[in-house]
Image: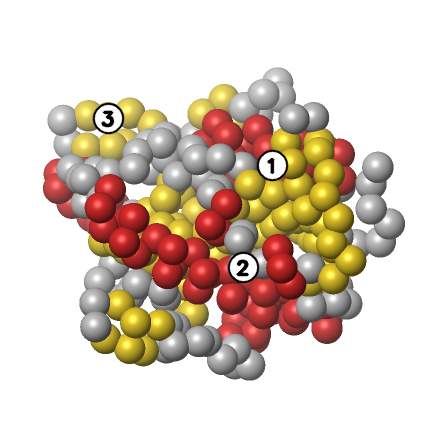
Amino acid sequence: MRAKGPTTLILGAMPSEVRTILPQLAGRTSGHLACFPYESGRLRGRKVIVAVTGVGVTNGAMVAALFINHFAPAELIVTGTGSRFNPRVRTGDTVISLKTIHHAAGSLTADGMVYRNVRGPLPGQMTSWFYKPDSTLLALAKAAIKTYEPEEITVDGTRYRPAVLTGIVTASDLFGVSEEKIADMQAKLRPDIMEMESAAIAQVCAQLGTPHIVFRAGSNRTQSNPGNDYRRLGQIAAAAAARWTTHFTGALAAANGSFR
């Protein structure tokens, strides 16, 4: 059953990316859509549905499409982590995506990737290799930075308050990438964060007419074998992104906006 009134859909790829959000839901209830579990309630006054997509572009697109079609949310928020591509991003800093890119969409040539649009599901339609967030949600997020007070975190013995900043997020089914791939992406895309789901979710939102915005906090640096560093830093980043997402949802409630 679709929720009455404007509802925000919040998606994270991993349970860790929504774990600190769930206890804050007022009137929290649990449900299943097909085989996929979700939690619903009010977060800082806003009706929300919170679900985990699983990792990767297929899982992200599948859950986003199913939940958008069933619940018709007013907007969708992606919250979670990504590797730190740009040195300006520290562990725990949250990037508000200005552009979310499929960094594996196109042709891989001797000179690296050539990014291309591809044929979409509708006759005569091409789909893009990058997507921008809803402009109203982006403006609200930028304004909400001014009232946000992040909690201090400790990373490798250094204690600081993580920042919230705008930047570029890239996504594909690559957990680690080679130095050659990093150099090619840097030259052609200049990303701040690399992760796995957001571009696919953004494409679903664009196709189905649902406003969206992506929040990704930096965990480990982008590298070919991030396993150990991700396990060490991913939880810190997930909690930082979730705190910002909670704050933004409160700003959304205060604005009393439905952007459909």
Which of the two discs, 2 and 3, sits closer to the camera? 2
Tag 2 secondary structure: loop
**Marks 2/3: CA–CA distance:** 39 Å
* Percent position of residue 172, x then y: 37, 35
**Marks 1/3: CA–CA distance:** 28 Å
What is the tally of numbered marks visible in this picture? 3
Which of the two discs, 1 and 3, sits closer to the camera? 1
Crowding at mark 2 (Cα within 10 Å: few <14, some 14-19, many 20+): some
Tag 3 secondary structure: strand
Along the polypeptide, which appears first: circle 2 or circle 3? 2
In the depicted view, which residue is nearer to us: 8 or 17? 17
Reading the image, the residue beneath label 3 is 108
Q: Which residue does the image show at 28% across and 49% down from the upper left? A: 230
**Marks 2/1: CA–CA distance:** 21 Å
Q: Quadrant of the N terminus?
A: top right
Q: Which residue does the image show at 75% across and 48% down from the upper left? A: 29
Reading the image, the residue beneath label 1 is 64
Q: Residue lying farthest top? A: 123
Q: Which residue does the image show at 30% across and 72% down from the upper left? A: 154
